[in-house]
């Protein structure tokens, strides 16, 4: 049998080739009806997803659970390390071993970069990175790309501005690398203290991807198709005073975007960077984007669990 999707784990968006991403986006399209409960599926009946969520999560955790259940499977796991034996001093390796014996795949979110990769050396079941510190968030990127594709019918050539905390925000790290593969034009808008990390800029330069950096939204607002807004990642600041100085750096409101031809996206949660007056406008795509987390994660689970059969 020819395997179309060859990944055993989903750790970084850099593990994907463009054709793998295209395959997942196509699968997602086919699964939207199941995600909306207009069709049913038993493709993962009898399969169990293990969920190790050491950091807070609403959308990622719930959409993985919904995805698994809509495909006839089920989930086990914990949210918050206080709820697991890690709080008694158990090592991450031992906890992962337990999950391996109880489930068919593991989804992990952790505050330390590299954690998901680490457990791939400990367990034999597929591992999916649901966010590792300020590192990567590959499944979020797939749903971000799907949202863009769904709205514009293409990704190539679009002008996408990533705004906010580009230093600590993991969603923008994976997204910048993926948009590079799809020949989108990128602008990075952030306070000077929160610029896109040099390693990511080097990766883009190596692939001849052009990008523009600024700290002012007004420099890009007339040019962009997508405003991808992010929250300042308070929990990753070593010094709370530094956060206080920067918080509220950007506000996207109705007045700013009125009359422009663009969409507003956000991985959520939003704190104060998008005003509520954008919610009831045609610009708001962030809630639709959060829904796409379900069919995208169905596509990933279906293919990654099946790959191990
Ligand atoms: C993001 C995350 O956890 O990185 N949330 C999400 O998964 N939708 C963004 C954030 O927390 O700011």
Image: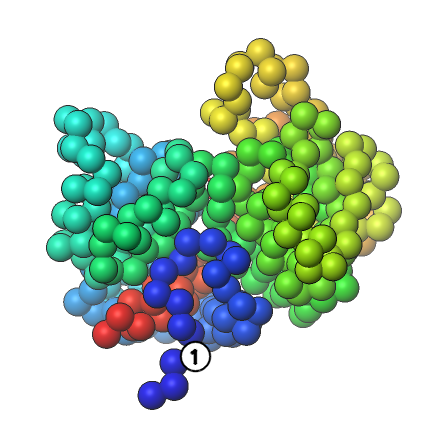
Residue 79 image point, x, y percent? 28, 37
Q: Is 45 in front, or is 136?
A: 136
What residue is at 59 percent from the left and 29 percent from the top?
232
What residue is at 64 percent from the left and 52 percent from the top?
203
State left or right for residue 231 relative to residue 137: right
Total number of numbered discs in the rendering: 1
Q: Mark 1 points at which residue?
A: 4
Q: Is 82 in front, or is 207?
A: 207
What residue is at 36 percent from the left and 70 percent from the top?
303
Q: Is 284 in front, or is 128?
A: 128
State left or right for residue 50 relative to residue 184: left
Q: In this view, does 290 lie above or below 45?
A: above
Q: Quadrant of the N terminus?
A: bottom left
State left or right for residue 43 relative to residue 111: left
Residue 269 image point, x, y percent? 51, 36
Secondary structure at numbered mark 1: loop
Q: Which quadrant would residue 294 be assigned to in this image?
A: bottom left
Q: Which quadrant would residue 40 be assigned to in this image?
A: bottom left
What residue is at 36 percent from the left and 38 percent from the top?
110
Q: Does the beta carbon at disc 1 come under 8 Å from ligand 1?
A: no
Q: Residue furthest top?
A: 241
Residue 304 image point, x, y percent? 34, 67
């Amino acid at each position: 049998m020819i395997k179309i999707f060859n990944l055993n784990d989903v750790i970084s968006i850099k593990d994907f080739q463009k054709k793998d991403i295209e395959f997942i986006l196509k699968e997602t399209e086919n699964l939207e009806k199941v995600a909306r409960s207009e069709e049913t599926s038993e493709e993962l009946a009898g399969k169990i997803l293990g969920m190790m969520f050491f950091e807070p999560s609403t959308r990622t955790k719930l959409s993985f659970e919904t995805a698994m259940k809509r495909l006839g499977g089920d989930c086990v796991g914990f949210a918050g390390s206080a709820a697991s034996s890690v709080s008694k001093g158990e090592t991450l390796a031992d906890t992962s071993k337990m999950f391996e014996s109880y489930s068919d795949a593991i989804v992990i979110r952790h505050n330390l970069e590299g954690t998901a990769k680490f457990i791939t050396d400990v367990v034999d079941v597929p591992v999916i990175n649901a966010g590792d510190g300020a590192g990567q968030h590959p499944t979020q990127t797939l749903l971000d790309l799907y949202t863009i594709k769904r709205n514009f019918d293409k990704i190539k050539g679009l002008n996408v501005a990533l705004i906010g905390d580009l230093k600590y925000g993991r969603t923008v790290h994976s997204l910048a690398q993926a948009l590079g593969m799809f020949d989108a034009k990128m602008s990075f808008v952030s306070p000077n203290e929160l610029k896109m990390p040099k390693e990511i800029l080097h990766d883009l330069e190596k692939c001849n991807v052009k990008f523009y950096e600024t700290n002012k939204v007004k420099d890009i607002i007339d040019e962009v198709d997508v405003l991808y807004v992010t929250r300042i990642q308070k929990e990753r600041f070593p010094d709370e005073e530094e956060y206080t100085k920067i918080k509220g750096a950007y506000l996207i409101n109705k007045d700013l975007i009125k009359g422009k031809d663009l969409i507003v996206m956000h991985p959520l949660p939003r704190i104060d960077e998008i005003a509520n007056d954008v919610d009831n406008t045609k610009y708001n795509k962030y809630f639709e984007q959060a829904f796409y987390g379900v069919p995208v994660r169905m596509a990933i689970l279906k293919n990654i669990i099946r790959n191990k059969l």
